Image: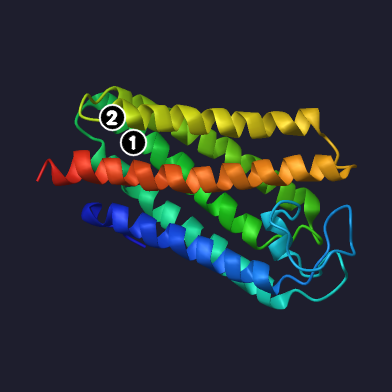
Amino acid sequence: MYLEKKQIFPVIVIGTLQFVILTIIAMMFYTGGTRIDKTTEGYNFFTNFLSDLGRTTTYSREGNLVSVILFVLALTGLGVTFLAYFRIIPEIFNQNEMEEKLGKIIANIGTIAAFTFMGVAVTPANLVAPIHDALVVTGFSLVAILLGLLLVLTLNDPKFSKFYTLTYILLIIVILAYGGLFFLIPEIITYNDLLIRVTMQKVVVYSLLLCFLIQSYGIWRYRIVNLN
């Protein structure tokens, strides 16, 4: 998928919306069960991970085909969107040598991150948990690096307001805090453990989507529209 520079913001909007809409529909079809309580009915926003939507069999041991299909479509669509987005970054940030180098690095890391998230979609946690978990950790780690690099690019361009800088910094903090939870709560044993981990996952995912919406708008506005 090749993305023209002027399409960067609307494409991110579409990619983000399709993910949100498809996963919400998938939640409606999830039959039930959580990691610590297999008797619950339906999907609980605060005690079911997003990855539960991709389980071929739910914790309640029922089929989950509709949710799986929707989850795979949603995450793959988001991965393709990010792939196109990151690959065009070098064409947007190329006004000096530093931008050219960072732009290429971002494109390469972003490509890996995009395929990593697409890999999450096709590795059900109930079948290949180690691979699934490794892809999730790798994906979020790469995103944190990408945000740091994009932060450097925007800091070196006075046209970008400090609002974008603050957005990057806050999301990096949120991602690092989420990573820290794996050390504070290495195993989910109690209901509170599950509640904290799931809630934080949702905060990270939706904050990430919002950040990319804000970021793509800023790039579209300051590096595409204002330069034409």
Could you say whether the residue bearing mark 1 is in a helix, strand or loop?
helix
Amino acid type, mark 2: Glu
Residue 112 seen in the figure: no
Q: Residue 64 in the image: x percent, y percent?
A: 75, 74
Q: Observer-nearest residue: 180 or 88?
A: 180
Q: Residue at 70% of width from left, 64% of height from top?
A: 54
Looking at the picture, does residue 178 appear above or below residue 195?
above
Report the label total: 2
Determine which residue is flagged by label 2: 99
Q: Is residue 5 left or right of residue 79?
A: left
The reply, left or right, for residue 110 in relation to residue 221 is right
Q: Secondary structure at mark 2?
A: helix
- Residue 2 shows in the view: yes
The numbered dot on residue 103 is: 1
Q: Residues within 10 Å of mark 2 (few under 14, many from 20)?
A: some
Front residue of 118 and 208:
208
- Residue beneath the point at 54% across and 38% down: 142
Which quadrant of the figure contains the N terminus?
bottom left
Vertical relation: 5 (above or below) 18: above
What distance separates the C-alpha of mark 2 from that of mark 1?
A: 6 Å
How crowded pointer 1 is (Cα within 10 Å; few <14, some 14-19, many 20+) is rated as many
What amino acid type should be assigned to the residue bearing mark 1?
Answer: Gly
Does residue 5 appear to the left or right of 108 in the view shown? left
What residue sits 62% from the left and 66% below the top? 71
Residue 164, percent from left and from top: 35, 32
Q: Residue at x 21, y 27 (%)?
A: 96
* Horizontal relation, residue 84 to residue 176: left or right: left
Mark drawn on residue 216? none
Give yes or no for contact between labels 2 and 1 (Cβ–Cβ under 8 Å). yes
Residue situated in front as seen by the camera: 190 or 133:
190
Q: Is residue 23 above or below residue 176?
A: below
Q: Between residues 160 and 1, which one lies in front from this camera angle?
A: 160
